[in-house]
């Protein structure tokens, strides 16, 4: 069984190309996994339903201020500040010691620059600190206490990220200490990719990671090429799900490289999932990996091994929240090699 990515385009998504971005307001959820929306620029695509208001803020920021990095930072910052979101920023599920440790990264396509922080405590906007790492240091990634000190040096203040309700849940968890599944309720990383009106590609990703993780555990989200990757010649991709199953494959990088070889964003997401599922000892469901992608033209794609994976896309025409195509083991095995 071949591991190689396909070298030719295949068109296996049919019937959904005509579905447009829904009107003005936030969207309609379509039932037919229809990621083939008309390409438009600027475009913002992000993981999950809560990506919709984040995209809208990103688009507004870009339209008003002209900066895609501001757009990505503000859009993701909205989700980081949302207390009700249990896997990003404040309100996130803590680690096994009851401490919220957050991860984030940002990438700028035109100069292929990147910044990242991991395992940071008490910082409300890790995406902003990741941007500072990119812009103010000669490094790409800072972790733990060093990242926190850097944030404080840059003028950010500390904010307790553990909410009372997450503390209560953690205390209950501690009694049992069972490893929580990453499922539909426990799945909230935001990865966002934006393409500006000229086709330049930018992206960011932010998470508090796997709930009750071993202290110090870092997932895919802040790892360039795993939870996020952009290449200005091609497009970008981002991930959500069990980071361990994404980072072992540099999956976002793999998707971007598949697009470079001529696949559409949708085909690239699916081909990458198929390649991982075929190789891995875990089945599709156990892998729990979900991806979004967009190319320079603003064409989008999304696919996952989790049935409930939704993504949000925003252009000047409006916002749409959609179910991503779910790839099961059976489909992948029946699908043959691609
Ligand atoms: C992680 N990928 O830390 C993140 C978690 C996630 O939906 O995306 N949850 O592994």
Image: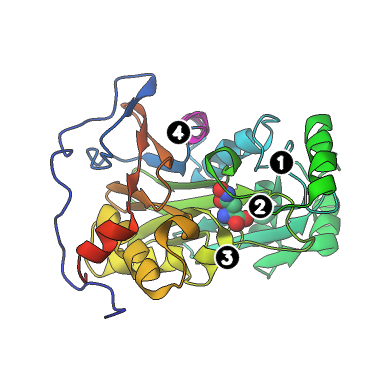
Residue that appears at 49% across and 36% down: 51
Q: Earlier in the sequence, mark 2 or mark 3?
A: 2
Magenta-tinted stretch: 50-62
The foreground one among 264 and 197 is 264
Q: In the rendered structure, find residue 121 and report the number of the disc placed on it.
A: none
Q: How many marks?
A: 4
State the separation of the CA atoms marked 4 and 2.
26 Å
Instruction: Check disc 3 and report its element: helix, strand or loop.
Output: helix
Residue 114 lies, with reference to residue 318, above or below; the image says below
Q: Earlier in the sequence, mark 1 or mark 3?
A: 1
Residue that appears at 80% across and 52% down: 151
Instruction: Check disc 4 and report its element: helix, strand or loop.
Output: helix
Residue 266: x and y, percent?
A: 28, 53
Contact? badges 4 and 2 (CB < 8 Å): no
Q: Earlier in the sequence, mark 4 or mark 3?
A: 4
Residue 191 is left or right of residue 174, and the answer is left
Q: Residue tagged by mark 3?
A: 244
> Mark 3, residues whose alpha carbon is within 10 Å: few (<14), some, or many (≥20)?
some
**Nearer to us: label 4 or label 3:** 3
Q: Residue tagged by mark 2?
A: 209
Badge 2 residue CB within 8 Å of ligand 1: yes
User: Does the segment drawn in magenta span residue 315?
Assistant: no
Q: Residue tagged by mark 1?
A: 92
Residue 48: x and y, percent?
A: 48, 38
Image quadrant where one finds the N terminus: bottom left
Task: Tell me the chief SS of the magenta region.
Answer: helix
Q: Residue tagged by mark 4?
A: 59
Contact? badges 2 and 1 (CB < 8 Å): yes
């Amino acid at each position: 069984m071949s591991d190689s990515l396909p070298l030719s385009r295949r068109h296996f998504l049919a019937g959904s190309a005509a579905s447009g971005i829904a009107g003005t307001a936030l969207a309609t959820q379509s039932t037919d996994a229809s990621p083939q929306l008309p390409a438009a620029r600027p475009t913002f695509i992000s993981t999950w339903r809560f990506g919709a208001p984040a995209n809208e803020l990103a688009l507004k920021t870009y339209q008003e201020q002209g900066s895609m990095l501001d757009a990505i930072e503000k859009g993701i910052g909205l989700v980081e500040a949302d207390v009700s979101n249990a896997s990003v920023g404040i309100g996130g599920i803590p680690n096994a010691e009851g401490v919220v440790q957050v991860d984030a990264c940002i990438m700028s396509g035109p100069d292929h620059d990147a910044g990242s922080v991991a395992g940071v405590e008490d910082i409300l906007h890790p995406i902003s600190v990741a941007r500072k790492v990119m812009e103010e240091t000669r490094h790409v990634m800072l972790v733990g206490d060093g990242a926190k000190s850097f944030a404080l040096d840059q003028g950010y203040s500390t904010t307790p990220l553990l909410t009372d309700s997450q503390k209560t849940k953690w205390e209950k968890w501690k009694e049992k200490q069972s490893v929580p599944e990453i499922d539909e309720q426990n799945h909230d990383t935001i990865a966002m990719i934006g393409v500006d009106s000229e086709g330049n590609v930018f992206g960011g990703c932010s998470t508090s990671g796997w709930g009750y993780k071993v202290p110090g555990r870092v997932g895919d989200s802040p790892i360039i090429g795993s939870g996020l990757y952009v290449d200005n010649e091609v497009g970008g991709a981002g991930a959500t799900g069990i980071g361990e199953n994404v980072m072992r494959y540099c999956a976002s990088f793999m998707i971007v490289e598949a697009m470079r070889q001529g696949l559409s964003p949708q085909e690239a997401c699916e081909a990458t999932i198929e390649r991982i599922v075929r190789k891995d000892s875990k089945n599709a469901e156990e892998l729990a990996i979900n991806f979004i992608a967009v190319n320079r033209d603003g064409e989008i794609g999304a696919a996952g091994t989790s049935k409930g994976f939704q993504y949000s896309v925003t252009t000047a025409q409006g916002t749409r929240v959609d179910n991503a195509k779910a790839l099961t083991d059976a489909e992948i095995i029946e699908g043959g090699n691609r």
